[in-house]
Amino acid sequence: MKSRRLFSTLVLCLAMQPIYGVSAQSMMRSTHDNHLIESYVAYISNNDLFNSSGDRLTQPWQIIRQDRANFHRFGLRDPGDESDSFFASAKNRAIMEQMLANGRISPQAALDVIRGGALVLVQIFGSGSIGRCVVVTTAH
């Protein structure tokens, strides 16, 4: 993309919990155990708002997950979409809901994603190759 739009202020991932564990207390990790694994920019188009059955998606995590499935699995790429290696894995796409629940998205960014036509920055935090949360911001 020739020029990048400005993104809202970076929100730190405060709820850094791994998705695997036995109990909630044993799952808590300090932010020192997590780091930025990868980030990418994607344009949320009308194609991303519907699943493979043609049903309208209603949650931000569903739409962001569909965007990555469209990009990696179906080859449906929008202008502005960047590649990522983390969500190239169907297994990693399957944990998007939990990763966003453990991460951050502002109410406005969530609305922007649900409406479509938004440019999003997705930051993936975790440890090693294990993703624990995502932080999603949208362009203004």
Image (tube, rainbow, N blue to C red):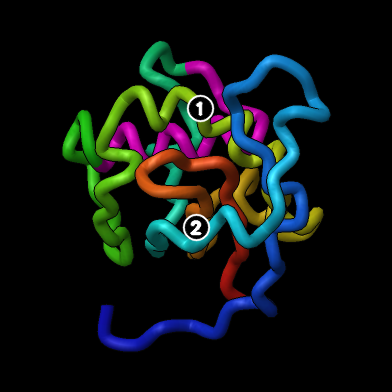
Which quadrant holds residue 70? top left
Q: Amino acid at mark 2?
A: Val
The number of discs equals 2
* Residue 27 at x, y percent in the picture: 71, 31
Asked if residue 104 is positioned above or below residue 73 in the image, the reply reads below
Asked if residue 24 is positioned above or below residue 104 in the image, the reply reads above
Name the residue rendered at 41%, 12% in the picture. Answer: 53
Asked if residue 138 is positioned above or below residue 114 in the image, the reply reads below
Secondary structure at badge 2 equals strand
Name the residue rendered at 74%, 39% in the picture. Answer: 28
Q: State the CA–CA distance, disc 2 to disc 1.
A: 14 Å
Say which residue label 2 marks: 122
Secondary structure at badge 1 equals loop
Name the residue rendered at 32%, 44% in the picture. Answer: 86
* Residue 25 at x, y percent in the picture: 82, 29
First of labels 2, 1 by sequence position = 1
Q: Which residues are magenta?
A: 55-71
* Residue 14 at x, y percent in the picture: 76, 56
* Residue 110 at x, y percent in the picture: 70, 50
Q: Is residue 60 magenta?
A: yes
Say which residue label 1 marks: 95
Give the prevailing secondary structure in the magenta stretch.
Answer: helix
Quadrant of the image for the C terminus?
A: bottom right
Residue nearest the viewer, comparing 103 with 51: 103
In the image, which is nearer the foreground, mark 2 or mark 1?
1
